[in-house]
Image: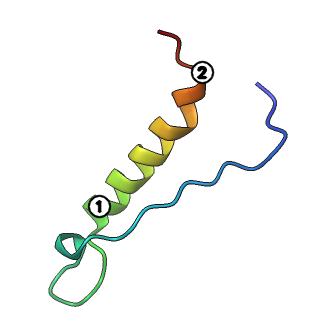
Amino acid sequence: MTLRTPLIYETCVKPEWIDHNGHMNVAFFVLAFDEATDAAYEPAQSG
């Protein structure tokens, strides 16, 4: 697979993803990367 343009995935950080220090919880970084990976492979999936 050759990419001609960069893949861009955007999402919003949800309030429930923020810990008591005001930082995004690391578990939700994993979730965001997982959702981005799913979006990247979506065009290659067939029926």
| Residue 40, image quadrant | top right
| Mark 2 lies on residue | 44
Name the image quarter holding residue 25: bottom left
Which residue matches tag 1? 28
Tell me which numbered mark, 2 or 1, is placed earlier along the sequence.
Answer: 1
Direction bottom: furthest residue: 21
Residue sitting at 17 percent across and 71 percent down? 16
**Residue at 39% from the left image edge and 55% from the top image edge:** 32
**Left or right: residue 24 compared with residue 47:** left
In this orientation, which residue lies closer to the viewer: 5 or 20? 5
Front of the two marks 2 and 1: 2
CA separation, marks 2 and 1?
Answer: 25 Å
Q: Where is residue 7 in the image (x, y as percent from the top left)?
A: 67, 48
Kind of residue sitting beneath label 1: Phe
**Tag 2: amino acid:** Ala
Residue 31, given in percent of the width and then of the height, sits at: 32, 52
Please tell me which residue lies in front, 18 or 5.
5
7 relative position to 36: left or right? right
Q: Is residue 20 above or below residue 42?
A: below
| Residue at x 19% of width, y 80% of height | 19
Which secondary structure lies at badge 2?
helix
Q: Do the residues labelled 2 and 1 touch (CB within 8 Å)?
A: no
Position of residue 35 relative to residue 19, above or below, is: above
Spot occupied by residue 6 in the image (x, y as percentages of width and height): 75, 50
Q: Where is residue 13 in the image (x, y as percent from the top left)?
A: 34, 71
Q: What is the crowding at mark 1: few (fewer than 14 residues within 10 Å), some, or many (at least 20)?
A: some
x 51%, y 60%: residue: 10
Residue at the limit of the structure toward the front, as seen here: 47
